[in-house]
Image (cartoon, rainbow, N blue to C red):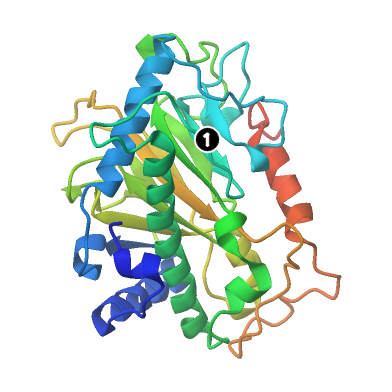
Amino acid sequence: MIISSFERGACLTTHQQMGFETCAEELSVNGYALLRLDELCQHQQHDVIPRAFDLAREELDWTAAEKTVPPSIDPAEDSSGWTGYHSATTRHYHYGRYNQNREGFVWSNGEQFDADIDDPRRRSFNEATHDLFHVLHNIGKNVMEAIEQRLIIQHGYFQQEFGPTCSSSQWHLKRYVDEGDGSIMVEGGFVDDENVLLPIHTDPSLVSVVVIDREGVQDGGMGLEVYEASSKSWREITCSGHKVAIVFVGHYLSFIAKNTGLFPASKHRVVKWRTSGGSRCRQQRMAATLFVRPRPNAIMKPLPSPLNIVAGAVSGKTPPTFAALNARVARNYMKSKKRSKG
């Protein structure tokens, strides 16, 4: 594992703990933060992340060539419980406006599936992706613990009240398909700008952890942009790669922390990636994203933080369960297009 001490459940070193505390501080103000995995981790196995990406790309290529058929997701199913493969949205297979340009694999609620390929080390697709999930989830878990410290709430509160998140979260490995592949809807209408590949959104999570498939640490986010409310402008993520975790505050953490005035949900999008010279880059973008989610029957009540500084933020209504709240988000996820007001 890339973070073997996390997998063993060992205590963080002071250096690691400071890294997550800094991350929580940035999340509390900006809604997003970057974690340098090579600086946080003393014990690394560098091949976990690239191996999973390599196997996923190979399986997607085989699927496109009809050499293999992984378990396919029924687009009629509730997207919050998807597990399997989906193509990019087409006239025949509607996977929502957020998948107009993406295909890939999704795992929900601890479910797994295998593919027909193995890497040279005989690590199955199932095992490789399972290892990657644990890397992402352990990062997310440690971020949540740092958030507990930032909000001065009991250590382990999130896992006690909303977990175990290892069996309630959702994650995916997806790549952006090329317009020349013929799998994208040609009539468009899903996004406001032809250069936008993934429309503006906040994530259906407490926190999200994203790793982009590129070696090491490289400049930019391959088109991943965050919206900065202070300047009312879009800003590309400064760096990405196998040694960088991009962390976002999701809608659900913002919902239960609104009494504190902290942890705004991060609005972000993906645009067509261009080189520094302004020409469009043809490198195919792929990313792994974990949505750390509560269990279905968790009560989405305000966090018991003494930093209760927003008057009137707590409603007198009975807090909803996560399942009820998430059902509304899932319906929005599957809408065909965002209708303009008028």
Label 1 SS: loop
Q: Is residue 259 left or right of residue 172?
A: right
**Which residue lies at the image location 59% right of the left edge and 66% below the top edge?**
253
Task: Indicate the quadrant where residue 162 lies.
Answer: bottom right
Q: Is residue 66 left or right of residue 122?
A: right
The N terminus: image quadrant: bottom left
**Amino acid type, mark 1:** Phe
Which residue is more in the foreground, 282 or 62? 62
| Residue occupying the far bottom of the picture | 306
Q: Is residue 325 left or right of residue 289?
A: right
From the top left corner, tell me how far across and down residue 276 is, in percent: 15, 37
For residue 233, say whether it is visible.
Answer: no
How many marks do you count on the picture?
A: 1
The C terminus: image quadrant: top right
From the top left corner, tell me how far across and down residue 191 is, in percent: 53, 29
Q: Is residue 121 left or right of residue 253?
A: left
Residue tagged 1? 113
From the top left corner, tell me how far across and down residue 39 is, in percent: 19, 67
* Residue 192 to residue 62: above or below: below
For residue 114, say whether it is visible.
Answer: yes
Which residue is more in the foreground, 297 or 310? 297
Which residue is more in the foreground, 206 or 332? 206
From the top left corner, tell me how far across and down residue 43 is, in percent: 21, 66
Task: Indicate the quadrant where residue 116 lies.
Answer: top left
* Residue 159 to residue 250: above or below: below
**Which residue lies at the image location 36% right of the left edge and 42% below the top edge?**
128
**Which residue lies at the image location 55% right of the left edge and 20% below the top edge?**
89
| Residue occupying the far left of the picture | 277
**Which residue lies at the image location 47% right of the left edge and 84% below the top edge?**
149
Task: Indicate the quadrant where residue 53 lies.
Answer: top left
| Residue occupying the far right of the picture | 317
Label 1 CA crowd tier, 10 Å (few <14, some 14–19, many 20+): some
